[in-house]
Every structure is written in C-alpha cells, then in structure tokens.
Amino acid sequence: MSIQLPPETTGYSDCSPPPQTRQMLLLLGFTIGLIAALITSVGLMTDLLVSFVPVSVEQQLGALMAPAFEQMAEPAAVQDQLNQLLDRLETHLPQQNRDYQLLYIPDNTVNALALPGDRIVIYQGLLAEVESENELMMVLGHELGHFAHRDHLRQLGRGILTQLVLTSLFGDTSGLQQAAVSGTAALTDARYSQSQEYQADEFGLAMLQKNYGQVAGATDFFARISRPGASLDFLATHPGSTQRIERLNQQIAAKKYNIGKKLPLPGAIRQLKTSSY
Ligand SMILES: [Zn+2]
C-alpha cells in the first residue's frame, strides 16, 4: 500500500518538476549519457581489447589464417629474396619477439597486407611497380609499422577481438577457426584510417633511416601509385597518397634525414618486371 503525501509536505518547490517527471528526466539523461559514452568509447574499447590479446594468441589465429594465403604463395627465389630484405629490417625493430615472414603471391594485385601472426603478404603486382630496393624496403617497413601499432588486429573488429581475449583468458580455442574465417574476410577488405597510415609511414621512414643511414626512395611508391592510370588495389586499402608524400617530405626535412643513392632491386625481383604475368 502506498501513502500519498500532500505536495506541500514533500519539500519540493513549485519550480521543480514533480518527482515522476524528474525521475523520467534523470532516466532520459542517463540513457543519453550512456549512449554518448558508448559511442565515444567504441575506439577506446577496441584499443583495450587489442591490448589484451597476447602475441601468442595472435599467432594461433595467424596459423589458422595463413593457409588460405600459403595456397596461393610461390616459395621461390623471389620469396627468398624478399625474406632476406625483411630480415634486415627486423634487426632494427625495437622488440625482437617476433619472426616476420613474407608470403609472395604471383598475382597482379598491387597490394601488400599484414596478417596476424607475423606474416606479410605481398603480391607480384606491387613488386612490378617498385623500381629500387629502397622503395621496396619502405613498403615493407610500412607493413612492419602496422604490426608495431597492431593495426591489423584492430581491423578484425570487436567481435573477433573479444573472441581472442576470451581465448587468452580461458584457453578455449574452439572459436578460433570461425574467427580465422571472418578475420580473413575482414583483413582482405581492410581499409586503414589515415592516421594509421601516417603512423605506418613514419615507422617505415624510420626503418629506412636505420637500415641505410639515409631515406632515398621513401616517397617513390606513393608517387608511382598516385599517378593517373595507376592500379587502384593499393589505394583502395591505403588512401591519401598525395598527402602522405607531403607528410613524409615534411618529416624528412624536420628530422634532417639525408637522401642518398638508391640501390637496385635484388636480381630475382628485378627479373619479375621483365616477365609477364
Ligand atoms: Zn598501410
């Protein structure tokens, strides 16, 4: 049984809304606040989930995703030479807890992508575009930048990331196979944000400087693919080439990096440019 008190005994002034209305307003305000917090925290949530995924679980997922690309890969002289270049860059990485490997796919797609679990996929179409070892090293350094910032994990989406966190917490790997299937689709269509691209470029530039002591070739690839009539595969997943060239040039000037001579591409990769595909 409820007791209704007369309004004058409840202590609220005439200016205040009655209790029921006030409760509704509070509830409404709380709901709006909650929605706003959820929207603004989506990015933070992704960052938080990513920070909870250990490298070992990422590698477990990668082991399930890699076969789809390995089937298309061609373990030949080109792939060996690419891995030798990648090994040289790896010696300059701040953390030495990974062993990156390159998968070379003989397909005319002009693209490269970072897979979870230390694999970088590079297509023949991209190799056909590059003109110097330095230019190629910048592309590889850029992909290592995506690993360093764990951008490729963010692209998997919160559903898969949650699965990975659960796997690491409870050791239950039953959901990983499905995560690998969805993850492969998500990464193939991945479109990195401009800030992720800038960060990866900056990382690649630092890799060039560490490896050669100068940064010749840092902007060549982006200039080449932004020319009229260039293939759009790489641009579809790596937007804004013109701004990226400007930004790289600003950083080269600000850091007073030297621009020296470029080295020719290693033999097997150079031969690709003359062979048809
Ligand atoms: Zn990128």
Image: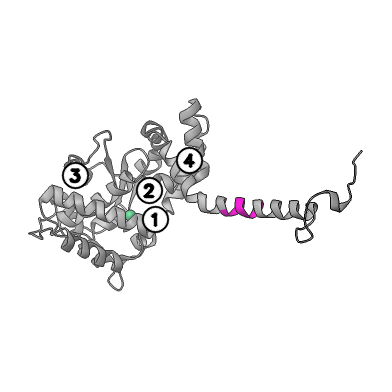
> Of the numbered discs in the image, which one, if any, rests on residue 151?
2
Asked if marks 1 and 2 touch (Cβ < 8 Å), the reply is yes
Taking the view exactly as shown, the residue that stands out farthest to the top is: 171
- Residue 269: where, in percent of width, then height? 18, 52
Q: Is mark 2 within 8 Å of ligand 1?
A: yes
Q: Depth-wise, is mark 2 or mark 3 nearer the camera?
A: 2
Residue 208 sits inside the magenta stretch:
no
Chain-order first, disc 4 or disc 3: 3
Asked if marks 3 and 1 touch (Cβ < 8 Å), the reply is no
Stretch in magenta: 31-36
Chain-order first, disc 1 or disc 2: 2
In the rendered image, is residue 276 in sight?
A: yes
Q: Is mark 1 within 8 Å of ligand 1?
A: yes
Chain-order first, disc 3 or disc 1: 3
- The residue closer to the viewer here, 269 or 111, is 111
> Label 1 belongs to which residue?
192
Q: Residues within 10 Å of mark 2 (few under 14, many from 20)?
A: many
Q: Amino acid at mark 2?
A: Asp
What's the CA distance linking mark 2 and mark 3?
19 Å
What's the CA distance linking mark 1 and mark 2?
8 Å
> Label 4 belongs to which residue?
161
What's the CA distance linking mark 4 and mark 3?
28 Å
Q: Quadrant of the N terminus?
A: top right
> Of the numbered discs in the image, which one, if any, rests on residue 89?
3
In the rendered image, is residue 105 in sight?
A: no
Q: Amino acid at mark 1?
A: Tyr
Q: Amino acid at mark 3?
A: Leu
Measuring 42% from the left and 51% from the top, which residue is drawn there? 188
- Residue 73: where, in percent of width, then height? 31, 44
> Of the numbered discs in the image, which one, if any, rests on residue 158?
none
Chain-order first, disc 4 or disc 1: 4
The local secondary structure at tag 1 comes to loop
